[in-house]
Each structure stands twice: as C-alpha cells, then as structure tokens.
Amino acid sequence: MDSGLKSDQAEYEELFEIEGEASAGGGLIEDPWPAWTAALAKGAVLEGSLAECMGLPPEMNGGGLYDPARTYYSVFSFAAVSEVFTRKDDFWSDVYNDMGTSQEFGETILSLDGISHRRYRDVLQPFFQPPVAETWWREKVIDPMVTELVESIREDESIDINTRFFARLPLHTMTGGFGLSHQEGLELRRHMQAGLKAKTMEDRLTSREQTSNVLKGAILEKRENPSDDLISHLAHAEITDDDGTERKLTHEEITNHCRLIVFAGGETTWRQMGNALFALLNHPEQLAEVIADRSLLAQAVLESVRWNPDPTFPRKVKRDTVLAGVELPEGAHLHLCLAAANHDPSRWDNPEVFDIHRPFKRSVAFAAGAHSCLGQHVARQEIIAALSALFDNFPNIRWDSSKPTAKITGSIVQRGPGPLHVLLH
Ligand code: HEM
C-alpha cells in the first residue's frame, strides 16, 4: 500500500523547495555571509531592517518581515541577540501578531508572552523533554520511519537525498507523533504551503481552514478514544485560566498548536538535516571520524546548526530601552540575525569554520529564554537517527560529482540546501 512516505516524489520536490520560494518572494541571495560579517563588525545593533543593514533593497526582507510604516533595528552580536531573547520585560513575541503570522496559524505560544505563553507551553513541554525525545519519539515515531526510508533507497545508486529522505522524515515525525497518517501529513503540508504562497489574506484564511479540516476528525476521535499520541495528550490536558478556572483545551487551541508544530517542526528540521550532511560531506576528514565513532554525531549536529542556522527571527520592543548602547523606541521591530550571532568572533575562534571538535558553547540556533525552541531535542534525535542510519547502511556515501554541486541557498530569512545528489554505494 502507498503510505505516502516513500512515493509522491514530484510532490515532495514541489513542497520542499527553498530556492524557488525565495526567488518567488524576490529574496534569493547567493552568499549573504560577507554582508552579515560586515554588519557585525559595524555594531552589535544597527538602525534599519536586516536587508537595509546588509545594503540590500527592502523587498529582500522576506517572510512578512518588512512593513515600510515601521521602525526597524537589526541585532548582530551573540550577546545582544541573547539579551533580546531573555529580557522578557523589554522585548516580546507580539511581533508575530503585527506580521500576520498569528492570523495564519491562530494564536499560539509563538506569539504569546508572559503567563499566557507559559500556560500553553507547560502543556506542550512534557512531550518534548530530552528523555521523551530519546525514547518515545525515537522508538514510536522516528526509528521505524528511518528504517522504512533507508529501505526505500537501498537499491539506488545516485539520489537527491534531500527530497527522497530528508524532506519526509521531519514532516511525518510531527504528524506521526500526532497520530495522523502519512497521507494526512502530506495534505497538511500542501495546505500550509498554499497559505504561505498566498497573496491575499482571504487565500491565507482558506488554507488555514483547510488545515483545520484535516485535523478536525483526528481531534474529535481522540477526545472520544484517546491513544498514545500528541493530539490525545492535548485533547485531555487541563489548563488554568486567569480567573483560576480549570478547563480542557478548546478544539481551536489544539488545532492552532498542531498547525504551528507541523510548520516549525517540519520545515527547520528538514533544512538542518540537509545542512548537517552538507557540512560533513564537505569535510571528509570529519565525516570519516563520525562514521568511525558515532558518539561524535551529537556534537556534529550542534556544530552544524551553529555554523549555518535559520538566519533571522523577529521581536518587538515592548518599552523604550537600551540594547548594546543603542536606544530602542517602544514598538520598533527587531530583526535578530542568528547567523551573525552564531559567527560572532568574540565567542568563537574562526567562527566560519565547521569544526566538530571546537569546545562546545551554546549557540542561538534554537533561540534562548522562554521561547527557546520547543522541539529542539526531537529535532536533534531526528537528525542523529537519520545520519546514523545512512552511515550504517551506506558508509561510502559521497557527492555525486556528475550532478550539480550542492549549495546552501535561499533568502536572508530562510536558508538551507537545495538538491543533495549523493552516491550511496
Ligand atoms: C533543527 C531544527 C529546528 C530549529 C533550528 C528550530 C529553531 C527555532 C527557533 C530559533 C525558535 C525561536 C522562534 C522565536 O521565538 O521567534 C523556535 C521556536 C519554536 N520551535 Fe523550533 N526549531 C527546530 C525544530 C523544531 C521542531 C522539531 C519543533 C516541533 C515541535 C519545533 C517547534 C517550535 C515551536 C513550537 C517554537 C515556538 C516556541 C515558543 O514560542 O515558545 N521546532 N525554533
């Protein structure tokens, strides 16, 4: 039977395509690193949007990150970016309401602050703690899928591993964790991509409705007949309102958070899985070490997300304040350049070098503070499981030099590898 995990290659190519998405938004850029390095050398915090600070036209601030009516500052140093993430009385995530993200996903932990944020985060967090990532997610969801995906490529000589394997695992890990089928997972992704590409709010709301419809049956079913999955957990969890009333999450609250998790968990992990293999294949000595000693993989994954993170996230200034000596007015939007922060030479020696042996220091690839990435431990387990299985089964994995050279591509907001053509045997 076609489960949707192994087939539908053309659809995966269409639904997971970084360069086309960035070009359509006018934001494709070959190499943003020199401009990020130059901006950081100029100052920890600069006035202007990220594109402006990089000397690019404003339309290159993709992903709803720019509105000419607003005031922008961009933040580049590791210390200043970390402060923004952790000074919760001065900076807030309400920025996602201004950008229209909450209209697309509904109200979620991403855009809430303070006690309202904590209320939902406390319900979700237990499912994403390290021991649960290492056992429940690995055993129930990730490892069986990795095995299936390895079998699906075993006889191939040359493949684009990014769409044949990496695009599939994170999406279906999330939807599998919800208790949905692979086909339902693909359907969710399809509607969400349509929403992201939509030009009008009406079309965005239609896509939001369609994702709700995919989730609706599952939520109703799991309210009646709970089983061992995330939707069942959410359908029966209790939260406490401001007035002390205890109640179950509403249908809409569950739907909104599932939508966010599919997007946040499917998208970034896919890019970072490709990024980790890209980094290792381009550093054959380190690849050989990891293949010989799999205990190095965990640090290789943390180094690859430091080296090439999802580059940009937003925040809003909650009240007049000062950051790294720069006065910031209430209401200004901040573009946090995680890429520049993760290459801050005051924290890392030779930060542009991918080195799995560098002494570990936490980066901001998974943010920090109250909004630090909910799924980071699951994401790391997915990447470790996928790469470990590839190295076990295809220890000669290497670039296919007869195909176009792999590269990291995209915009200044979202970057990741395009096709990753590898020889398996
Ligand atoms: C390597 C993969 C990943 C990276 C690099 C990453 C990165 C991030 C970053 C930087 C943030 C902060 C966003 C902000 O506050 O503006 C974030 C938040 C979040 N991430 Fe991830 N993420 C990854 C995988 C995942 C996965 C697998 C999930 C699945 C649950 C997930 C769910 C979330 C959620 C729900 C938030 C919002 C948390 C909150 O606001 O309290 N992420 N992630």
Image (cartoon, rainbow, N blue to C red):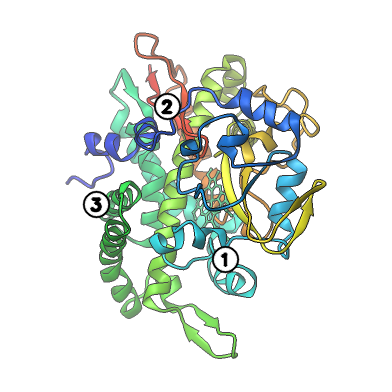
Which residue is the site of mark 3? 183
Q: How much space separates mark 3 and mark 1, taking CA atoms?
A: 27 Å
Which residue is the site of mark 2? 393
Front residue (pair 110, 372): 110
Q: What element carries label 2?
A: helix
Q: Which amino acid does label 2 sit on?
A: Asn
Residue depicted at x 37% and y 28%: 161
Q: Which amino acid does label 1 sit on?
A: Pro
Earlier sequence position, callout 3 versus callout 2: 3
Please report contact status of discs 1 and 2: CB closer than 8 Å, yes or no: no
Q: Which x, y percent locates residue 282? A: 54, 17
Residue depicted at x 28% and y 70%: 216
Residue depicted at x 61% and y 54%: 315
- Residue 150 is at least partly visible in this image: no
Earlier sequence position, callout 3 versus callout 1: 1
Badge 2: few (under 14), some or many (20 or more) residues near its Cα, within 10 Å? Answer: some
**Position of residue 207 in the picture relative to residue 314 (left or right):** left
Mark identifier at residue 351: none
Q: Which x, y percent locates residue 119? A: 58, 74
Q: Is mark 3 on a helix, strand or loop?
A: helix
Which residue is the site of mark 1? 126
Q: Which x, y percent locates residue 24? A: 34, 35
Q: Can you tell which quarter of the image residue 205 is in?
A: bottom left
Front residue (pair 61, 58): 58
Q: Residue furthest front?
A: 69
Mark 2 vs ligand 1: CB under 8 Å?
no
